[in-house]
Image: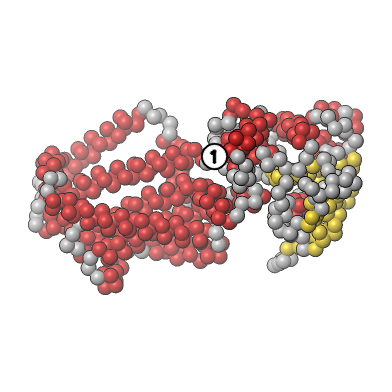
């Protein structure tokens, strides 16, 4: 969870800008090839090959079945991610500015982070019941901790001289927070949000797969249950595409922030 | 500024200043110290490492309160608050990496409430005064260490401070850059008329820049010697070739040597 591990690759990847689109295309081709190979190998029982899937997906995208479920997932995910981001940021700032609190909180959070949270899902269900709240709660359980840990780490690694500078420039606590602390920590915070984004989505989807009548996770599992391989593969494909695009966008954002500040 | 500005009134006055840190282990860091800075004077403070130079600076700018004794700036006591009119430059790079040079320098004036035209003018003046005009839209990451330190000095200059405190501002720079930054500092001192207190571990820097050099003892830091340099006001780094320069640094060193040995002995 060290923040430097997140920042480091940015320097190296910045080198040959030209090679990038080609690399991406090669990667895409390899992934399609692998997909095709798995499809052939399992003779279409587990995974449908790319072309039929894409054809099916185009049709699926015109049905309300897909969009209703996508909307349900999106709603739960956005709420879970928003809670993770806001609460994570607040907790990270609170813990980060209080050395004792962060010494206590960090090992607890790191410990919680490593627990396979699926094992707690029955408890979540019992507490929140079937429906959107359980999905959101499970999304937050996944997404909250990385934001807290990244923010906390960023605040703690803030150069003390910047805080002293704020003091001698006679800034109030609030101004110090908004003008010094927050911008200084922003690259790391965005890094935490990026991880939280994937994990909140993961949490919501897992929740839907286990116990829900709506959402893409539900659609995926029902595809598998009905042995509709094309449906399940299509849903997976959509989720993968959305996740990759979102991840790239946030990576781009955090890279821009880091480039400017380092 | 309406306080009586008679020539005899000291700009900064420390009386019986002591700073102790509560344990464990309790540390008697500084004092008792008596120090008076005349308006427009350039004073350096040298001392063995760990003698409380930075603690002294913290008390001078009001960031820290003395355990006992008083710190007066322009006739009023400092009470753990940084008063307006004091600018501080630290040893570490304190430029804000997410702001451009212009924004960094503006940062000093964010709470000033000055009209934006005035801010713009002050910022551009300070930036070109520090020789950064062509880098005004650069970010700190694109600048060398010396240039970043100049950004920090410019950020202090826009405040038009009457007292500038510098805590080993050139400590992290190479020798040539340090000499040239010393020249910049002297030019700045002459043009602003500010009182300057420079904390440094470099005896040559202290001897070259100051009107007066205070030598501190090992912890608890006290002044054991004050040396007048006698340089003219329009001096620059070429005073290092003056015959008196060697004598000055030699005197500083002889005052400091025993104290430094004490620190070493304590450390080993």
Position in image of residue A104 (x %, y %): 51, 66
Q: How is the image coloured?
A: secondary structure
Label 1 chain ID:
B
Position in image of residue B164 (x %, y %): 74, 43
Q: Residue under label 1, please give it.
A: B99
| Quadrant location of the C terminus of chain B in the rendered image | bottom right
Position in image of residue B37 (x %, y %): 84, 47
Q: Residue at x 44, y 56 (%)?
A: A89
Kindly tell me whether residue B201 is visible in this rendering. no
Foreground residue, A96 or A1?
A: A96
Look at the picture and state if B268 lies above or below B252. below
Q: Residue at x 79, y 29 (%)?
A: B237
Horizontal side, residue B128 vs residue A181: left or right: right
Task: In the displayed orientation, state which residue is furthest to the bottom.
Answer: A126
Q: Residue at x 50, y 54 (%)?
A: A153
Disc 1 on helix, strand or loop? loop
Foreground residue, B14 or A10?
A: B14
Kindly tell me whether residue A239 is visible in this rendering. yes
Foreground residue, A90 or A43?
A: A90
Q: Quadrant of residue A218?
A: bottom left
Q: Quadrant of residue B143?
A: top right
Q: Residue at x 82, y 53 (%)?
A: B75
Horizontal side, residue A49 vs residue B100: left or right: left
Position in image of residue B179 (x %, y %): 75, 31
Q: Residues within 10 Å of mark 1 (few under 14, many from 20)?
A: many
The image shows a total of numbered marks equal to 1
């Amino acid at each position: 969870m060290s923040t430097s591990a997140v920042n480091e690759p940015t320097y190296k990847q910045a080198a040959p800008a030209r090679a990038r689109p080609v690399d991406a295309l090669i990667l895409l081709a390899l992934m399609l090839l692998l997909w095709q190979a798995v499809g052939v190998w399992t003779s279409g029982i587990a995974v449908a090959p790319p072309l039929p899937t894409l054809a099916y997906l185009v049709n699926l995208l015109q049905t309300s079945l897909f969009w209703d479920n996508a909307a349900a997932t999106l709603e739960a995910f956005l709420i879970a991610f928003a809670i993770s981001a806001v609460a994570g940021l607040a907790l990270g700032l609170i813990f980060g500015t209080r050395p004792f609190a962060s010494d206590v909180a960090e090992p607890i959070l790191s410990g919680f982070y490593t627990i396979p949270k699926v094992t707690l899902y029955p408890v979540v269900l019992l507490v929140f019941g079937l429906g959107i709240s359980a999905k959101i709660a499970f999304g937050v359980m996944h997404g909250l901790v990385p934001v807290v840990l990244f923010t906390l780490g960023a605040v703690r690694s803030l150069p003390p001289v910047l805080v002293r500078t704020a003091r001698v420039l006679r800034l109030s606590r609030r101004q110090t927070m908004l003008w010094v602390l927050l911008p200084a920590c922003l690259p790391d915070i965005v890094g935490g949000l990026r991880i939280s984004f994937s994990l909140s989505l993961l949490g919501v989807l897992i929740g839907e797969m286990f116990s829900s009548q709506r959402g893409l996770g539900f659609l995926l599992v029902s595809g598998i249950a009905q042995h509709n391989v094309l449906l399940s593969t299509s849903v997976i494909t959509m989720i993968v595409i959305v996740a990759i695009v979102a991840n790239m966008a946030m990576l781009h954002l955090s890279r821009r922030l880091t480039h400017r500040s380092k | 500024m309406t306080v009586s500005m008679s020539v005899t009134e000291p700009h900064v006055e420390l009386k019986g200043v002591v700073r102790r840190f509560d344990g464990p282990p309790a540390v008697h860091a500084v004092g008792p110290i008596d120090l008076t800075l005349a308006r427009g004077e350039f004073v350096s403070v040298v001392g063995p490492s760990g003698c409380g130079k930075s603690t002294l600076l913290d008390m001078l700018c009001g960031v820290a309160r003395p355990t006992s004794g008083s710190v007066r700036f322009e006739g009023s006591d400092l009470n753990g608050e940084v008063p307006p009119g004091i600018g501080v430059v630290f040893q570490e790079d304190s430029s804000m990496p997410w702001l451009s040079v212009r924004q960094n320098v503006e940062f000093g004036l964010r709470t000033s409430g000055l009209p934006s035209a005035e801010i713009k003018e002050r910022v551009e003046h300070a930036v070109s005064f520090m020789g950064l005009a062509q880098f005004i839209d650069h970010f700190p990451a694109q600048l060398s260490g010396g240039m970043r330190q100049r950004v920090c000095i410019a950020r202090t200059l826009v405040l038009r401070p009457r007292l500038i405190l510098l805590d080993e501002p050139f400590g992290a720079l190479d020798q040539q850059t340090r000499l040239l930054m010393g020249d910049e500092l002297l030019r700045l001192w002459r043009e602003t008329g500010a009182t300057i207190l420079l904390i440094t571990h470099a005896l040559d820097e202290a001897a070259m820049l100051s009107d007066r050099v205070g030598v501190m003892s090992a912890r608890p830091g006290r002044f054991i010697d004050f040396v007048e340099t006698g340089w003219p006001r329009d001096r620059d780094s070429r005073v290092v070739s003056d015959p008196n320069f060697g004598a000055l640094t030699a005197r500083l060193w002889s005052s400091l040597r025993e104290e430094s040995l004490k620190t070493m002995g304590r450390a080993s």
